[in-house]
Image (spheres, rainbow, N blue to C red):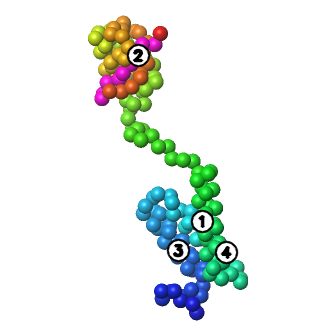
Amino acid sequence: MVTLMGLALDNPFWVWTAIAALLLAVEVMGGTGWLLWPSASAAATAVISLLPHLNWPADLAIFAALTIVSTLAARRFWPAPDSHEGEDINDNIARLIGHHGRASHAFAGRAGRVFIDGKEWAADLDEGDDLAVGASVEVTGVSGSRLRVRPVR
């Protein structure tokens, strides 16, 4: 019986299963995705280790090859996370950028009110100083709780 640090290595299936479970547990705690593929590779190596005439160096080589292939394949085919830093999907004001509406009150000195998506908002003009009631506008940005708009001609 071969031992490593007090563990019996006579049945590699259980050793590889334990490694897979340990890697998966660490992945669940961290949530980075980096250990998901080595965990799956260890589980696959556990099943492959049941084949007769395989030894530990062969198992290690299989595990390394599966980890490399599965990680590269995941990077190639798994969709990249959408990394819009600072954007909040619950921000109901920022989602209005690009939307069109109408001036609900006349703009004077670049400030006024607009009606967009069924709500009235305080707004500032990006271009020009005045805008008549009913003029079409497009939201170009957000400044605090006020929309920045430009006239649509």
N-term mark: 1 or 4: 4
Q: Quadrant of residue 114?
A: top left
Q: How far apart are the alpha carbons under marks 2 and 1?
A: 53 Å
Q: Amino acid at mark 1?
A: Thr
Magenta segment main secondary structure: strand
- Point out which mark residue 48 bears: 4
Q: Residue furthest right?
A: 52
Residue count near mark 1 (Cα–Cα under 10 Å), binned few <14, some 14–19, many ≥20:
many
- In the picture shown, does residue 128 fall above or below 86? above
Residue 75 screen position, x and y as percent: 58, 53
Dot 3 or dot 4, earlier in sequence: 3
At label 4, which amino acid type do we have? Answer: Ile
Q: Which residue is mark 3?
A: 19
Label 3 neighbour load within 10 Å: few <14, some 14-19, many 20+:
some
Mark 2 vs 1: CB contact within 8 A: no
Q: Amino acid at mark 2?
A: Arg
C-alpha distance separating marks 2 and 4: 65 Å
Residue pictured at 60% horizontal, 65% vertical: 67
Q: Which residue is mark 2?
A: 150
Q: Amino acid at mark 3?
A: Ile
Q: Which residue is mark 1?
A: 67
Q: Residue at x 41, y 9 (%)?
A: 135
Residue sticking out furthest to the left = 109
Highlighted range, magenta = 144-152
Residue 77 at x, y percent in the picture: 62, 51
Q: In the structure shown, which secondary structural element does the residue marked by tag 3 occupy?
A: helix
Instruction: Tell me the CA gap for discs 2 and 3.
Output: 60 Å
Q: Is residue 108 left or right of residue 103?
A: left
Which of labels 1 and 3 is toward the front?
1
Please say whether residue 47 is visible from this viewpoint: no
Q: Residues within 10 Å of mark 2 (few under 14, many from 20)?
A: many
